[in-house]
Amino acid sequence: MESVTDIPMASPAHAPGLLATSRAAAILLTKELRLEFRSREVLTATVVFSLVVITFFSYVFEPTATESRRYGPGLLWIAFLFAGSLMLHPSFAREQNNDTLDALRMAPISPFAILLGKLLANFIFMSLTELVLVPVFAVFYNLSLAGVAGRLTLVLMLGTLGLVTTGTVFSAISAHARMRELLLPLLLLPILAPLLIAAVEATASLFAEQPALDRTWVAFLAGFDIVFFSASWLLCNFLVEE
Amino acid sequence: MKVRIAGTVLVAALVSFAGYAALFIAPDESTMHEVQRIFYFHLPAWMTSFTAFAIVFVSNIAYLTTRRLKWDCLGVAAAEVGVACCSIGLITGPLWARPVWGIWWTWDARLTTTFILWLLYISYLLLRGLLEDPQKRASLSAIFGIFAFLDVPLVYVSNRLWRTQHPQPVLAGGKGSGLDPTMAKVLLLCVISMFAVMIPVLIDRYRLEKLRHEYDELRIEAENRATDPHLVPSKGHA
């Protein structure tokens, strides 16, 4: 929390400008990262959970190269979506234990900075999880990443951005509810249905025998991100208000 | 009260006549025969549920801009009616699909979209049930409602690109679409009767929700009076 006081004091009467918002978001991002890397609780739990999920998939189907090409992308994204719906819960719930969200609200920063800081932190956590999981998945399921790593990173980044954008907003919503741990996946997963289809199809196009990035689905993923990122930006005032 | 009884009788008569017309007056469909008659319930149910979900979206935006709880009441009323009508669509659909397509369900664009829509609005209602504070409930569920509605076209487009099997729109669906005139009249009657059921239910549910809010406010006020020794009970408040 100490870092919040470092924010350049914008007059509360004026809406903070773009520069002030990005500075505040950067400071909050540092705070989130420091908090997480002190304990690494969320990251460890997410990586282990995803590993359990992909191990269980190997019981469900034979992990040969042809089978993996057919089912692999779907399994990978389902593992990410489930992991994300669990990982994103503490993002706002953690702020409630010591009422630290009130302190953030009182800071002379735009509400979007609070959301953006958390969103970027979640993006980094999710990316780190994927960084561990994708190579492990490729080894376990005989998929070759050679030659597609760059394009796969693009698909993963677009998919992850959509996941953490909606997920961070819903984490702020579910933090106020009863049974909030159970509620977040229920809110989040149906919304992510189009993202799942697009991400799976785009990933599958890279794991095919002749890898070629399916541009339609990449464009769709980008569209999904833009729609929900803009909606989060427009609605964030209502999200973090008292 | 008299208006209520008269209204109920009128709606009941309308619905009975629409049901009769759909089953006996509408001409036989050339390939699907009797099974096709479920269409007179399926399409109106879909129209009412979609209207209801659009009302949820509008009331969500209206609540966030005006902060008046009546919009929140309208939102929850419309969401419940929408889920009910959507359930009718989801039940009548497979009943028709089994004899015509040979399968109960297929993961086609419109079917999947409707199913996801149904799940989203059930989540919306669930979320409301789990938020205690009325102001928080109203604003947070409104945000979720807006996200849910924005998701619908995305679900549709993604499934459309993926695979599709549902019949092309019968009305205004381009070449070869259109209905027999009698069929069209029966369909219109069914649509009207479905809306005639939906709108009074929506209004009733809206009033009930407003009464609940008033009751909650009075209860909280009474509790505050009971616990606060400085407040003297005043006249004029229940």
Image (tube, coloured by chain):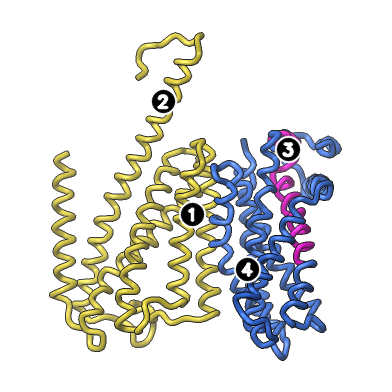
Chain colours: A blue, B yellow
- Looking at the rendered structure, the number of numbered marks drawn on it comes to 4
Image point 62% across, 39% down: which residue? A241
Is the stretch drawn in magenta largely helix, strand or loop?
Answer: helix
Seen in the picture, residue A150 relative to A44 is either above or below; the reply is below
Give the Cα separation between the discs numbered 2 and 4. Answer: 46 Å
Q: What residue range appears in magenta?
A: A102-131
Give the structural element (helix, strand or loop) at label 4: helix
Residue type at mark 1 is: Ser
Image point 62% across, 79% down: which residue? A71
Give the structural element (helix, strand or loop) at label 1: helix
Mark in the foreground, 3 or 2:
2
Image location (x, y in percent) of residue A59: 62, 75
Residue contact at pointers 4 and 3, CB within 8 angstroms: no
The residue that mark 1 highlights is B123
Give the Cα separation between the discs numbered 4 and 1. Answer: 20 Å
Circles 1 and 2 on the same chain:
yes
Image location (x, y in percent) of residue B77: 37, 48
Residue type at mark 2 is: Arg
The residue that mark 4 highlights is A78
- Viewer-proximal residue, B191 or A83? A83
Which quarter of the rendering shows the N terminus of chain B?
top left
Seen in the picture, residue B175 relative to B123 is either above or below; the reply is below
Give the structural element (helix, strand or loop) at label 3: helix
> Relative to B10, is A186 on the left or the right?
right
**Chain for numbered disc 2:** B
The residue that mark 2 highlights is B219
Give the Cα separation between the discs numbered 4 and 3. Answer: 33 Å
